Amino acid sequence: MNTSRTGWFVSVDGPSGIGKSTTVQALHSELEDRGIPARITVEPPRSELGQFTRQHANHIHGRALACLVAAARYEHIDQVIAPALRAGELLISDRYLPSTLVLQQLDGVPLQFLLDINQDAVMPDLAVILTARPGLIAERLHTRGITHRFHLDPTAPAREVELYAQAAAHLMRRDVKVLCLDTGDATPSDVVRTIADAIPPRPIASIISPSPATPQES
């Protein structure tokens, strides 16, 4: 894919219960207050394929689910992300590639398999990784209630925190700007202001193109 890129793309990821959707909505409001128009999107996307992925994620496992998530992502790129970047928009995605590198590993899929099937995904201009202490995340999940089979594993919060740190390191090795924020002791408004301040300047006609294949990671 070779497409003129004049917009911004910001992804927001983090462990279940960390407050991604709330943060994305608050970030949108903060940017509006600053006079910066932005648009929110989400993964899996709201397309028919995305809705199928979301509805069957508790029943389809492993590599099959990883391939389905990747297919929905490529559709998302073709139909939403790339057009927004061509149009010069600021697009904020609630979940993106880091969530795949974490959740699908929790589902037993090898990292290299995930890297291979997602190697042509458009990289964000800023990847935000929200995190907190595993105990705090577990408390939030208990309060919210179980919504996914991964939440049934009491070790999942600690494993997610560790895997998101690894996902952040992977993106940085691909020259993606990554912002890791511990939300445990920060106020929601502080988190949102920090993200808004970190959004890079508008890129000048950069090119959306496939990233080179990534060597085996462990």
Image (cartoon, grey):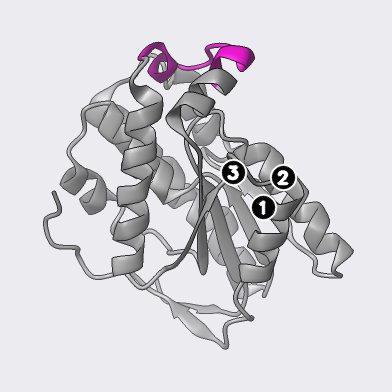
Whether label 3 touches label 1, CB < 8 Å? yes
Q: Quadrant of residue 159?
A: top left
Looking at the image, which residue is at 55% across and 19% down?
139
For the residues labelled 2 and 1, say whether their Cβ atoms are less than 8 Å apart: yes
Give the residue at mark 3: 183
Characterize the local packing of mark 2: few (<14), some (14-19) or many (20 or more) Cα atoms within 10 angstroms: some
The image shows residue 113, relative to residue 155, as above or below, that is below
Instruction: Mark yes or no: residue 178 visible.
Output: yes
75 on left or right of 109? right
Would residue 188 be found to the left or right of residue 217 on screen? right
In the rendered image, is residue 68 in sight? no
Of 39 and 145, the residue lying toward us: 145
State the SS at label 3: loop
Amino acid residing under circle 1: Val
Per the picture, the main secondary structure of the magenta-coloured stretch is: helix
Q: Nearer the viewer, residue 49 or 64?
A: 64
Please identify the quarter of the rendering in which residue 212 is found.
bottom left
Q: Quadrant of the N terminus?
A: bottom left
Image coords of residue 148 (percent x, y):
47, 17
Going from N to C along the chain, the mark reached first, 2 or 3, is 3
- Would you place residue 52 above or below residue 163 in this image? above
Residue type at mark 3? Thr
Q: Would you name the residue on which mark 1 appears? A: 191
Amino acid type for the residue under numbered disc 2:
Pro
Image: magenta residue range: 141-153
Relative image position of residue 37 (x, y in whole percent): 80, 66
**Cα distance between the residues tagged 2 and 1:** 5 Å
At 40% from the left and 11% from the top, the residue drawn is 152
